[in-house]
Image: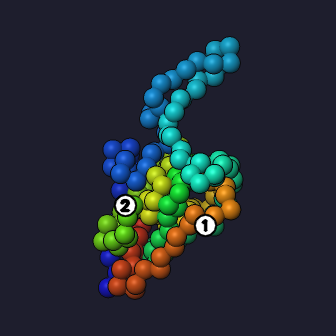
Amino acid sequence: MSRHITPLPLTQEVFAKYGDVLHVDNAEEVRTINEGHTKRYHRIAAPELTASDGTPCINIFRSEPQNLPFTVKLMERHPLSSQAFYPLGPNPYLVVVAPAGDLDPASIEVFLAQPDQGVNYHAGTWHHYSLALGSTSDFLVVDRDAEDENCDEIMLDEADWIMIEATAHG
């Protein structure tokens, strides 16, 4: 029997064990730059991208929208680096995570991220791939580029599937 979850709002406090919420409110400091025309929200996350000779890489992922309810059957992690996602469109999206270490399906949590919030998963944090809502969505992704393998995937047993229920905002 699958477990049913309604996503929680995404906040730095509840997400801290998995990574960082990329939002201007989480900046270490705000700097005025470019002759006073730009605010730099400084250090909203600290990516981990250089393990074993890796280098930072910037990508765009285009994700097809998912309908709710949605069943989570797969989780992945990147043991050698963090991975950051920032939405480039107007739609909320879902963030599905579990703590680093051996995957415990009972520990999977689901968050509803708003279009002005990104996430930076800590190295080893279990997560689901991008779950766009509403329409096809682009995400700016910062992760590690290297020749070695940096992605572990686990298919959940059917008894551990997670059914994500609809929310008022998603």
Residue occupied by mark 1: 149
Image quarter for residue 71? bottom left
Q: Quadrant of the N terminus?
A: bottom left
> For this rendering, which residue is in front, 31 or 111?
31
User: Mark 2 belongs to which amino acid?
Assistant: Pro
The answer, for residue 106, to whether it is visible in the render is yes
Pointer 1 and pointer 2: residues touching (CB < 8 Å)?
no
Q: Residue 144 at x, y = what percent?
A: 62, 53
> For this rendering, which residue is in front, 81 or 53?
53
Image quarter for residue 32? top right
| Left or right: 125, with 2 as reference point | right
Count of labels in the image: 2
| Residue at horizontal 60 percent and vertical 66 percent from the top | 149
Q: Name the image colouring.
A: rainbow
- Residue at the outermost top position: 35
| Left or right: 153, with 109 as reference point | right
Q: Badge 2 local density, few (<14 within 10 Å), some, or many (20+)?
A: many
Q: Badge 1 local density, few (<14 within 10 Å), some, or many (20+)?
A: few
> For this rendering, which residue is in front, 168 or 146?
146
Q: Residue 147 at x, y = what percent?
A: 68, 62
| Mark with earlier residue (1, 2) | 2
> Which numbered marker is on residue 99?
2
- Residue at the outermost front position: 52
CA gap, disc 1 and disc 2? 20 Å
* Secondary element type, mark 2: loop
